[in-house]
Amino acid sequence: SYPLPARVLTSQTEPDSTGTDTNGTGEPAQPVPEPDSTADDIAMRDALIAEQENLLNVYRCMFQIDTHAVPGGCQNDQPAQNP
């Protein structure tokens, strides 16, 4: 497996005349909240990858290309196994 890219957290701030970051109103900028959980990000990416693989298997069966790569094979131009 490959490591996930680091998240870059930024806020929309501009330096004011005092050299401190502000939110454009002259008040100190609020910090950007951290993501809830890296585990949530991983679960979301895993689900997206699974959906992409399922769609690829549908296309493989529909167009009869690389059907040997479809788990369970194809029946009636559809993957034989449910996603």
Image: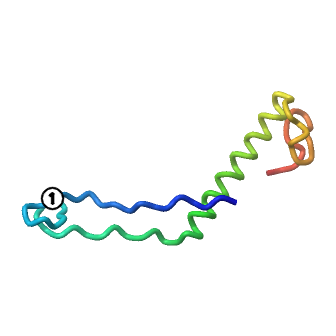
Which residue ends up furthest to the left in the rendered image?
A: 17
The residue tagged with tag 1: helix, strand or loop?
Answer: loop
Residue 35 pos. (x, y %): 46, 68
- Residue 55 sits in which quadrant? top right
What kind of residue is marked 1? Gly
Tell me the residue at 26%/57% (across/down): 12
Tell me the residue at 41%/60% (across/down): 8
Q: Is residue 33 left or right of residue 83?
A: left
Tell me the residue at 46%/61% (across/down): 7
- Residue 33 sits in which quadrant? bottom left
Foreground of the two, 24 or 47: 24
Residue 77 pos. (x, y %): 86, 33
Q: Is residue 30 left or right of residue 4?
A: left
Considering only vertical position in the picture, is 29 above or below 51? below
- Residue 41 sits in which quadrant? bottom right
Q: Which residue is mark 1?
A: 24
Colour mode? rainbow
Q: Is residue 73 left or right of residue 13?
A: right
Residue 61 pos. (x, y %): 84, 34
Q: Tell me the quadrant of the picture where the N terminus can be found.
A: bottom right
Considering only vertical position in the picture, is 40 above or below 81? below
